[in-house]
Image: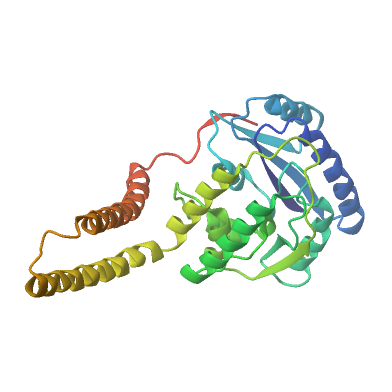
């Protein structure tokens, strides 16, 4: 028998979890027929939920001993929840899924065959449509992937989900990356391994509401940029050269104008604009460098990625 570990990060998903569990029971029954050599375990990671998510998971645990859970002391974020799931998973194969059924469980059979029959190390999913999402969010998402593929050395697939199945070797490689500032989609690409991409149409949540706001996703994208690219620092250097050259040319212009017209005091409004421009440029550059220093500072603290309140 081989064990398949299903990791499910949860934050205020008390309504969605029963739907998810019922859908997975159908998949598990189909696996029992088509792949009798596979056994399942579920690892629900309660990311400091404020509703009854933990109680729902514990009830499942009472009825099904293949259900396990990790409950955080507070909300540490989805990245920490995924890492906790990876650490607890004992399976030969590991699957990451969301509890809201936006990751179709029906794809699991095809994903499993990609590894066992086609020789892949991972089978990942990507949405080919964003039906049901606000248009501005979709536009910014596509822009993010285009930018990241230009400035980063690792590949970022547009529409990629965290929903994927991986071999134990790939999971162990991910666990070796113990950084606190995590962007798992980038980590998947960074560790490498042979991956098959499976496309599907966007599926709306079965219940509840998304926990990701537009500004939350924007902050998340900044984490990706800071974690997988030094292009902003190169931008600061380039901008510094450009501004210095502009300042040098401006000095020459002022000197020549003064010698010809003899009126060094005119044009003070434009001078104020120039001063403000340079001040803003300096603040921008300082902010970019400070963001990298801040991330480095947090990493040197070596704080745990998450703290467990209880697990079973």
User: What residue is rendered at 76% in x and 38% in y?
Assistant: 66
The N terminus lies in quadrant? bottom right
Q: Is residue 142 left or right of residue 25?
A: left
Q: Nearer the viewer, residue 237 or 90?
A: 237
Residue 74 coordinates in the image, percent (x, y): 54, 29
- The way the protein has been coloured in the rendering is rainbow
Identify whether 98 is placed above or below 142.
above
Q: Nearer the viewer, residue 119 or 148?
A: 148
Q: Observer-nearest residue: 270 or 280?
A: 270
Quarter of the image for the C terminus: give it.
top right
Q: Quadrant of residue 118?
A: bottom right
* Residue 95 seen from this side: no
Along the horizontal axis of the image, is 293 left or right of 168?
A: left
Residue 79 in the figure: left or right of residue 289: right
User: Looking at the image, is 174 positioned above or below residue 198?
Assistant: above
Q: Position of residue 192 (x, y in %)?
A: 56, 68
Q: How many marks?
A: 0
Residue 304 at x, y = what percent? 44, 39
Q: Quadrant of residue 208?
A: top right
Question: Can you name the residue that lies furthest to the right here?
Answer: 33
Q: Residue at x 36, y 44 (%)?
A: 298
Which residue corresponds to the image point at 82% horizontal and 29% vertical from the top-left? 63
The reply to whether residue 10 is visible in this rendering is: yes
Instruction: Say which quarter of the image contains residue 256.
Output: bottom left
Question: Is 19 drawn above or below residue 49 in the view shown?
Answer: below
């Amino acid at each position: 028998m081989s064990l398949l570990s299903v990791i499910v990060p949860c934050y205020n998903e008390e309504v969605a979890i029963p739907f998810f569990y019922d859908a997975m029971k159908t998949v598990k029954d189909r696996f029992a027929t088509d792949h009798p050599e596979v056994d399942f375990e579920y690892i629900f990671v309660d990311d400091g939920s404020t509703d009854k998510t933990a109680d729902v998971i514990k009830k499942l645990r009472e009825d099904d001993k293949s259900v396990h859970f990790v409950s955080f002391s507070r909300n540490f974020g989805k990245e920490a929840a995924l890492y906790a799931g990876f650490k607890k998973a004992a399976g030969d194969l590991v699957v990451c899924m969301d509890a809201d059924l936006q990751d179709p469980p029906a794809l699991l059979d095809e994903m499993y065959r990609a590894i066992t029959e086609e020789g892949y190390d991972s089978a990942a999913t990507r949405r080919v449509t964003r039906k049901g999402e606000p248009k501005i969010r979709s536009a910014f998402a596509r822009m993010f992937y285009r930018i990241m593929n230009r400035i980063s050395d690792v590949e970022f697939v547009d529409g990629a989900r965290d929903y994927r199945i991986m071999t134990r070797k790939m999971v162990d490689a991910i666990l070796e990356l113990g950084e606190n500032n995590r962007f798992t989609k980038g980590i998947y690409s960074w560790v490498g391994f042979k991956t098959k991409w499976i496309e599907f149409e966007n599926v709306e949540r079965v219940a509840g509401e998304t926990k990701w706001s537009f500004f939350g996703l924007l902050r998340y994208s900044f984490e990706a940029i800071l974690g997988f690219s030094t292009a902003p620092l190169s931008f600061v250097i380039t901008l510094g050269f450009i501004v210095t050259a502009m300042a040098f040319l401006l000095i020459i212009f002022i000197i020549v104008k003064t010698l010809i017209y003899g009126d060094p005091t005119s044009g003070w409004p434009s001078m104020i604009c120039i001063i403000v421009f340079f001040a803003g440029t300096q603040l921008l550059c300082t902010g970019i460098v400070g963001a990298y220093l801040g991330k480095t500072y947090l990493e040197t603290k070596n704080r745990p990625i998450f703290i467990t309140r209880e697990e079973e």
